[in-house]
Image: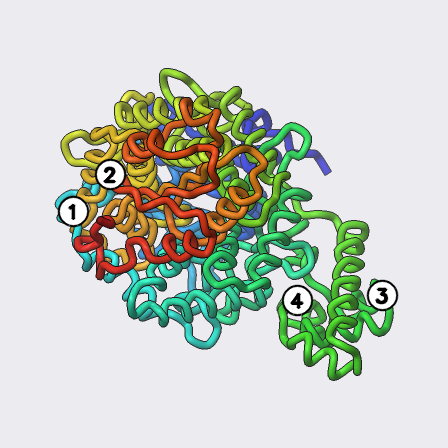
Amino acid sequence: MTQQPENRLKDSASPYLRSAAHQPVDWHEWGEDAFQKARAESKPILLDIGAVWCHWCHVIDRESYENPEIAALINQFYIPVKVDRDERPDVDARYQSAVSAISGQGGWPLTAFLTPDGKPFFGGTYFPPDDAMGRPGFRRILVSIAEAFKSRRAEVDSSAQALEEAVAKAEVFQGARGSLDSSLVDSIIDSAEQIFDKTHGGFGHAPKFPHSSVIDLMLERQKWPGGASLQTVVEKTLNGMAAGGFSDQIGGGFHRYSVDERWCVPHFEKMSYDNSELLKNYLHGYQALGLARYREVAEGTISWVNEVLSDQLRSGFYASQDADQTLDDDGDYFTWTIDEVRDALSPEEARAIEIYYDVKPHGEMHHNPEKNVLWIAASAETVARELKLSADDVALLLARAKGKMLEARRQRRPTPAIDETIYVGWNAMFVSAYLEAARVLGREDCRAFALKTLDRILVEAWDESKGFVHRVGGPRLEGSLDDQVFAVAALLDAYEATLDRGYFKIAERAMRIAVERFGDSEGGGFFDRAKDAAPMGGLEVRRKPMQDSPTPGANSVAAIVLDRLYAFTGEKLYRDWAEKTLEAFAGRIPQYGLFAATYGLAALLHARGVLQVVVLGKAGDANAAELEKAANEIYRFGKAVLRVTPEKIASASLAPALRETLPHLDATKAQALVCVETTCHAPVSDDEKLRALLSEIGTRAAGVAGAARPT
């Protein structure tokens, strides 16, 4: 058999694009060269957007793009362009919006048909090669679209123009401006409660995705009067996710989503951004609810990230782990037959695992009925009764068995591919998560790795004049709004952990760059691409990202970090921009429901103000250490805990009220001050009183408009 020569994707920086280098399709990367060729040859563009972790992207690759007959049709009638959605989120977001308007759904792979200047006129997601599963076949679509483009060009252009105008209007949130009031946060929480799954936890039905910001929002509001029902929602959801196959029971970490409503059978890819935010959820759940199980889940996630999803030598967090080793398996790396369990374990260990994880001769996987997804089906007490052992013996037995299964998985199975790309925004999210783990769990190793990663980003991805780029290494990719605001959040977290003014200065500089380059001074809020960025090409529309999907909405995160900067500096610019940003979307928030949960957090923080806890006392003071521990044990969204020894007072960036108060206190005495902007509470030296104070502040108000600061 003659080997297919590699196409022009062979030298791409993207592992997803390189994976298509052997295909007989004459692929182009996204760029002006492809548009010029399409215009010169008067051909439509076939746009494929996918990702290296995406199972169905690999399916359409194998079924269609590796098929010589289909490839010949594509090369004859189209200029084919392949895009990595992780590498070019700006391109993906715009065409997702357009295709959703056309077909009613988006996702990956995204398959779009564009005019030669990049305007979409038809599209969908996965298409089988021939008519199947209620979907038209790709062969038929390719021929019919090419014929329509040739014979009805005016109609195609008119349709593309109308679609572009509709996308432009929707993505910039025209007419969405409104005032902040209590109904906004209430509407988000009510929307989530209405679709809460009381049986299995989570929101909605199959497929079921994690909604991390909703969890944090409910944890914050459950402290308020009447908030007991929200604690139930949170606890049921955290328990359901942790017990299901959605959680990797052997290796730690979480898969991307569950295909069923029970959290049992997942889509097996693991994403950086899901795991950073879920790690925070379980840390916050542990703080707020005190359940040891949540600490165990957090520790397991950290162990998996340290082993699999990070560069422990140089620092940095990788982008994702694939679901499968080949298209012929479906999560085989993560699933088990009963014979595989028995082969790896002693008879007693195997029996314990079979009971605990419901491992049977017939499992849950359709492609191989013998394969079992591991999910917690029985309590440890049930295992103890079945095996006539003590609870302690069962705990040791299960731990030993899981260790052996993990080792067998590592040694006997090829590991699904890791995308080792280091994206700035996603790394910043994990830096924040690891610094949170350091505070809550006392994990000095997490603190050190987070700071090392942030320092690497500052060396390799920070531009003093333009802000952060999108990726560490490879050809330069201009940074998005996500990269800027998530990095600012990580820098502020690093400052709070270290009191290193260098981090704070760069956070301020980066946010001011974001205001200048991404901010909408007239309409409020921020665009995802800089005003002075090189033309994207194609669907060149302005876009303000607000919705949580799949990461926290960038405009909401921008408002949060602006309010955090205001709390430290008293600089009115920051508060004004936070308020303008929140108002820019207020009129549309109710229609987004739980997908606006980060907006809800931003609105609550803006109304309540950032809680700053300064713990004074000499270095090594045991009482000061107890106060710091108490401050870190309490979950309050946006809380800053600063350990300030006498020698650090002069150089620390502190809230204006703190700067006025501290000179009147004995900084050598162990005591804690809690301040919200212009108001400081009386200092406390008792850790229980500090816990009570932090739990109470800002929980008396009924909503955003009435969330008055303490007096």
Mark 3 surroundings within 10 Å by alpha-carbon count, few (fewer than 14), some (14 through 19), many (20 or more) = few
State whether residue 681 is above or below residue 222.
above
Instruction: Identify the amino acid type marked 3.
Output: Asp
* Residue 561 in the figure: left or right of residue 625: left
Q: Could you say whether the residue bearing mark 1 is in a helix, strand or loop?
A: loop
Looking at the rendered image, the disc whose residue lies closer to the viewer, 3 or 2, is 2
Q: Earlier in the sequence, mark 3 or mark 2?
A: 3
Question: Do the CB atoms of the residues marked 1 and 2 lie less than 8 Å apart?
Answer: no
Which is nearer the eye, 77 or 702?
702
Residue pictured at 39% horizontal, 57% vertical: 692
Residue pictured at 63% horizontal, 75% vertical: 377
Q: Earlier in the sequence, mark 4 or mark 1?
A: 1
Cα gap from disc 3 to disc 1, whole angstroms:
60 Å
Question: Do the CB atoms of the residues marked 3 and 2 lie less than 8 Å apart?
Answer: no
Residue on which disc 3 sits: 343
Q: Earlier in the sequence, mark 2 or mark 4?
A: 4
Residue on which disc 1 sits: 176
Coordinates of residue 42 in the picture (x, y in percent): 33, 29
Instruction: Identify the amino acid type marked 2.
Output: Thr
